[in-house]
Amino acid sequence: MQLPSLQIGKKRAKTCIIQGGMSICIALAPLAAAVAREGGVGTIGGMGINPDDLRTHIRTARQLGTGIMGVNLMYVGALFDQLLEVCIEEGPDYVAIGAGFARGPFARLQEHHIPAFAIISSPKAARIASRTPGISGVVIESGEAGGHLGPKDPHVSTWELFPEVYGELRECGFEGPAIAAGGIIDADDVRRALAMGADGVQLGTRFAMSVESSASWAMKEAWLRATGSQVEWWSPTGYASRAIVPHTDERLPRLDGVNLRCRNCLKVCSHRDDPSRSHCIRQALINSQQGSVGDGLVFSGARVGDIKDILPVREIFQQLTC
Ligand SMILES: Cc1cc2nc3c(=O)[nH]c(=O)nc-3n(C[C@H](O)[C@H](O)[C@H](O)COP(=O)(O)O)c2cc1C
């Protein structure tokens, strides 16, 4: 199947497939560059790495390959402003901003001619995005997505949410690309999303389960073992997210644990502010990424149980475009 191309600012990706940003060192330069080499849009997850490391990953991704490569930032991250400045200095092909919203960062990226995408999950957010200067594209992310969730109803599927939010965007006169995200894992899903009007698709879990993703093998095995019913939405920080169970309070690293201290990774964190429930989501995600899945948290999309293999990015593209 010949997929449409995707315009990102002045550049055009051969294929309208975006690899979603996945933070805490899952989507780094190797994955972003591999996706860009296949003609898709690669994205470095900017949360959970420090500004110098982000700069290094942007430069390394460029050295590893040609194609379109960007950065995903989470507005709720305490280092957001510093990471945004790195993006402005390094000029990635685009920056996607999710988990919170403010107009300022989009204006700043526009001043520096860096295309910016907003990640949204409601008709209200569509209205705001369409009025915000500097937003050149929108990712509409449903409750099936992995990681932090935007929709009020964490069970809402892409097929339910996308048409509603997309309709609002176009009614408000937004003409930029609208990308569908959440629960898209194969060529049939891609076709279905395009048939609904999407200009492209964003996939997270499918690319996390690739050879090139920087997750530990133990984390990749956890995804392979998981069934759909084991993937639940949960809120360890006050922000709803989707992860594989078990994620009981007892198992996550606690801020009062040995050698653990709060690094204030989020602007607001309900568990930091409540000492009786002081879990550290950052450490839990790092543990899984580094292989200690039993002491960690494994973010995952709702369709993980339908993905049966860890594949090189090239083969994932072959499957998505067949
Ligand atoms: C392990 C993991 C980490 C993620 N981290 C982020 C992140 O840092 N920022 C973000 O905007 N989205 C994040 N996401 C969401 C993805 O970018 C993507 O939009 C979503 O996973 C799409 O749904 P899918 O996993 O069903 O394909 C993450 C998803 C996963 C699975």
Image (cartoon, rainbow, N blue to C red):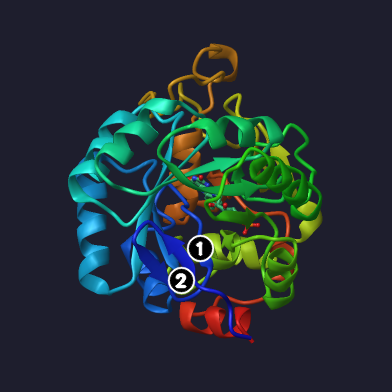
Q: Position of residue 25 (x, y in %)?
A: 39, 52
As shown in the figure, which amino acid type bears the numbered disc 1?
A: Ile
Q: Residue at x 70, y 35 (%)?
A: 123
Position of 228 compared to 293: left or right?
right
Q: Residue at x 76, y 46 (%)?
A: 161
Q: Is mark 2 within 8 Å of ligand 1?
A: no
Position of 147 compared to 38: left or right?
right
Look at the picture and state if 271 lies above or below 148: above
Position of 211 compared to 79: left or right?
right
Q: Residue at x 79, y 44 (%)?
A: 156
Q: Which residue, given by chain and number where applicable, does mark 2 sit on? A: 40
Front residue of 119 and 299: 119
Mark 1–mark 2 CB contact (< 8 Å): yes
Instruction: Look at the numbered disc 2 and give the secondary structure of its residue.
Output: loop
Question: Image quadrant for the C terminus?
Answer: bottom right
Q: Position of residue 42 (x, y in %)?
A: 41, 64
Q: Position of residue 284 (x, y in %)?
A: 50, 40
